[in-house]
Amino acid sequence: MRFASLGSGSEGNALLVSVAQTHVLMDCGFSVHDTVARLAKLGVAADQLSGIVVTHEHGDHIGGVARLARKFGIPVWLTHGTLRSQPKAFSGVEQRREIDPHSPFAIGDIQVTPFPVPHDAAEPVQFVFGDGARRLGVLTDTGSGTPHIEQMLSGCHALVLECNHDSAMLMSGAYPYSLKQRVSGRYGHLSNREAAGILGKLDVSRLQHLVAAHLSQTNNTPALATQALSAAINCTENWIGVATQEEGFTWRTIE
């Protein structure tokens, strides 16, 4: 089982998970042309995608989903709330499948387990991906942790964890007050400290990979994010990866 990011941040997000010949894309906030180019860097063609799973309806996560799905005939999985909130955004997608936020489902060789999260969207979810032996947990676009989130991510072999902002940088920065409140609120995005707090409650005994994701280019730095996460699990800062907006991160293999 392996995973890579096409890019992560407010300008577009997409994560690729592969097991054997099954390739699942989580979200797609890039244009078709950009997505195809970013996939090619990872050695995957768009017509090889087995499916797209959608976390929520914000543009940096769904901007390219429908166009990519229509062009290459890719099935799309999403919650009823996400579809209801943006029906036009998913129009013309022939293989559109609604999911229950609490019910696992399979796409080829990949087991996909959604779980609900607090975020300012209609029915947002995040996902754990598995191959029967290994588990990758993903948590971005979440305003706060919950016991259920901790239960879902505990014991994973790899984690992609949102570190959106440093609270001091956000509050002293140029964002309008209303936006600062939204980002830092319970239904906004995780700060470095909040992400570290969640991480510190997890069973990380099997953890092989930890990647900080969805970093704000205005209100955070990779150094601050990795410092916070490394302190939570007592590892070196350079062991932790960082997903960037332009490059994401290349393949990581879970043994």
Image (cartoon, rainbow, N blue to C red):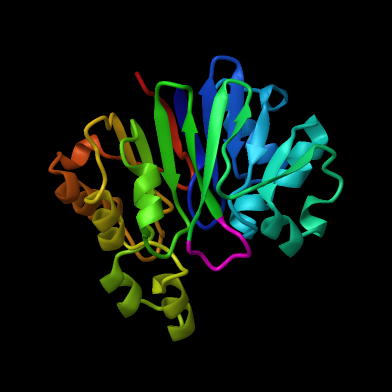
Q: Is residue 134 left or right of residue 124?
A: left
Question: Is there any visible trace of residue 212 in the rendered image?
Answer: no
Residue at 46 percent of width and 68 percent of height: 188
Residue 2 occupies quadrant: top left
Q: Is residue 77 left or right of residue 254?
A: right
- The chief SS type of the magenta part is loop
In the rendered image, residue 172, in percent from the top left (x then y), is placed at: 31, 79
Q: Is residue 195 left or right of residue 48?
A: left
Residue at 36 percent of width and 39 percent of height: 159
In the rendered image, residue 94, in percent from the top left (x then y), is placed at: 85, 39
Query: Start and end of the magenta stretch?
Result: 118-124
Residue at 55 percent of width and 14 percent of height: 20
Q: Quadrant of the N terminus?
A: top left
Task: Between residue 131 and residue 184, name the one nearer to us.
Answer: 131
Q: Is residue 150 left or right of residue 7?
A: left
Residue at the farthest top position: 20
- The mark total stands at 0
Residue at the farthest bottom position: 177
Task: Between residue 85 and residue 251, name the one nearer to us.
Answer: 85
Q: Is residue 96 magenta?
A: no
Question: Is there any visible trace of residue 68 in the rendered image?
Answer: yes
